[in-house]
Image (cartoon, rainbow, N blue to C red):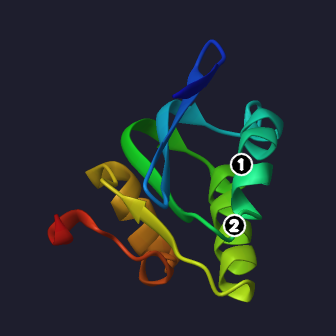
Amino acid sequence: MNTHKSDKFQTTITTESNVCTVYLTGELDLSVAPEFRLVLEPLVGDTSLDLVINMKQLKYIDSTGIGILLSILKARHGMDVKFTVEEVPPQIQKLFDMTGIAKFFTSQENSH
């Protein structure tokens, strides 16, 4: 398990079998975006792993955070490897729905 932490945002990374899960905690916004990108960069390009972003503990995301998720989606789609977002809190799901991006993220919530 790998953890990266700032005052208001934290990522915890676990890998089981061929699935890498990144757990987000706190607030993902412009101020922590560079740190988030650095954490995800090596994971996005690893085609041997399915990549899952777990948002259960995420309190807030701004347009910068959404942009990062969309860039991951685009990169992973281009490499034909799996990328999913799971356990999206209701307030963030509402934002995803309002911006029209919800349809691009495959949720695994009901498949467990």
Residue 108 in the image: state x and y as whole percent: 29, 68
Tell me the tag on residue 19: none
Tell me the tag on residue 40: 1
Amino acid at pointer 1: Leu
**Pointers 2 and 1 in contact (C-beta within 8 Å):** yes
Q: Secondary structure at mark 1?
A: helix
Q: Secondary structure at mark 2?
A: helix
Give whichever of 91, 45 is nearer the camera.
45
Q: Residue furthest front?
A: 17
**Which is nearer the N-term, disc 2 or disc 1?**
1
- Residue 49 in the image: above or below residue 8: below
Q: Residue at 62% of width from left, 59% of height from top? A: 66
- Residue 64 in the image: above or below residue 3: below
User: In the picture provided, is 107 more to the left or to the right than 104?
Assistant: left
How far apart marks 2 and 1 lie (CA) works out to 9 Å
Amino acid at pointer 2: Ile
Q: In which quadrant of the rendered image does the C terminus lie?
A: bottom left
Residue picked out by circle 2 = 72
Give whichever of 39, 56 is nearer the camera.
39
Residue 101 in the image: state x and y as whole percent: 51, 77
Q: Residues within 10 Å of mark 2 (few under 14, many from 20)?
A: many
Residue 70 in the image: state x and y as whole percent: 66, 70
Please count the marks in the image. 2
Q: Residue at 40% of width from left, 53% of height from top? A: 92
Q: Residues within 10 Å of mark 1 (few under 14, many from 20)?
A: some
Q: Residue at 42% of width from left, 35% of height from top? A: 59
Q: Quadrant of residue 81?
A: bottom right
Give whichever of 108, 49 is nearer the camera.
49
Give whichever of 44, 28 is nearer the camera.
44
